[in-house]
Image: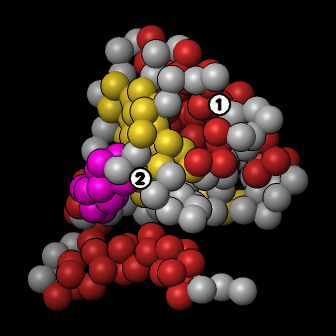
C-alpha cells in the first residue's frame, strides 16, 4: 500500500523537473539553457550501472550519494577510483545497510570514503547521486547487481545546476541527522 509520504517521495524528482520547466516557461527562458535532455535507462540489462560508472569517472570535484541498498561492486570500485584521484565523496545509506549480509558501506568506510547511516526515517529510500553540483542521477534504480540484472527499475541522468542545488540542499538536510559509519 502506497502511503502519501511514499507517493511524494516517488514523484519528487519528476515534480522538481516539472517545476524547473514551469519556471523557465514563465520567465520566457530557453529551457535548454537550464537543463539538457535527460538520459534514461531501464533495467534489467539496460546499462544503468555502466552509465553510473561513466558519470562517476567524469567527476572532478565532488560526489554526493544517497542510497537505500548499495551492493554494486562496479559502482563501489568507481567511487573508490574517484576518491583515490582526489574527488570528495560522501555517502548516506539507509539503516538496513547495518544488518545487510553484504553492503558496500563496509567497503567504502574502510577505504576512507565518508559514509553515513540515515536512521531518522522508517526507510531512507532515496537513490540519488549528485556529481560536481551539476549532474543528478536519480530514479528507482538501487545501487545493486539485482537492479541491473533482475529488477524492473529506471534511472535518469539530468544535467542542471539548478536542480542539483535542490538535491544538494536535501542531501545536506539528511546528512545533518545521519551518523558516521566506521564499518564492522
Where is residue 85? Give x, y as percent.
41, 12
Neighbours of disc 2 within 10 Å: few (<14), some (14-19), many (20+)? many
Is residue 74 depicted above or below 38 in this figure?
above
Tell me the residue at 42%/27% (across/down). Answer: 114
Where is residue 87? Give x, y as percent.
36, 22
Q: Which mark is residue 158?
A: none
Tell me where residue 133 sits by quadrant.
Answer: top left
Where is residue 135? Give x, y as percent.
38, 48
Can the viewer see residue 49 in this picture? no
Tell me where residue 73 sits by quadrant.
Answer: top right
Q: Are marks 1 and 2 in contact (CB under 8 Å)?
A: no
Does 1 sit left or right of 33 as displayed? right
- Which residue position is annotated with label 2? 136
Tell which of 136 and 184 is nearer to you.
184
Does 28 sit left or right of 95 as displayed? left
Where is residue 82? Give x, y as percent.
46, 20
Q: Which residues are magenta?
A: 163-176
Q: Secondary structure at mark 1?
A: helix
Amino acid at each position: 500500500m502506497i502511503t502519501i509520504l511514499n507517493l511524494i517521495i516517488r514523484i519528487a524528482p519528476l515534480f522538481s523537473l516539472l517545476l524547473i520547466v514551469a519556471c523557465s516557461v514563465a520567465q520566457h527562458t530557453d529551457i535548454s539553457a537550464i537543463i539538457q535532455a535527460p538520459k534514461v535507462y531501464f533495467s534489467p540489462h539496460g546499462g544503468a550501472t555502466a552509465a553510473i560508472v561513466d558519470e562517476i569517472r567524469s567527476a572532478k570535484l565532488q560526489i554526493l550519494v544517497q542510497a537505500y541498498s548499495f551492493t554494486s561492486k562496479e559502482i563501489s570500485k568507481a567511487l573508490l577510483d574517484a576518491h583515490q584521484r582526489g574527488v570528495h565523496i560522501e555517502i548516506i545509506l539507509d539503516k538496513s545497510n547495518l544488518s545487510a549480509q553484504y553492503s558496500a558501506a563496509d567497503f567504502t568506510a574502510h577505504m576512507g570514503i565518508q559514509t553515513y547511516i540515515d536512521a531518522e526515517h522508517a526507510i531512507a529510500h532515496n537513490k540519488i547521486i549528485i556529481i560536481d553540483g551539476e549532474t543528478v542521477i536519480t530514479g528507482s534504480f538501487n545501487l545493486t547487481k539485482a537492479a541491473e540484472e533482475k529488477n524492473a527499475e529506471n534511472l535518469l541522468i539530468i544535467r542542471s545546476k539548478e536542480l542539483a542545488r535542490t538535491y544538494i540542499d536535501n542531501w545536506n538536510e539528511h546528512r545533518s541527522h545521519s551518523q558516521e559509519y566506521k564499518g564492522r
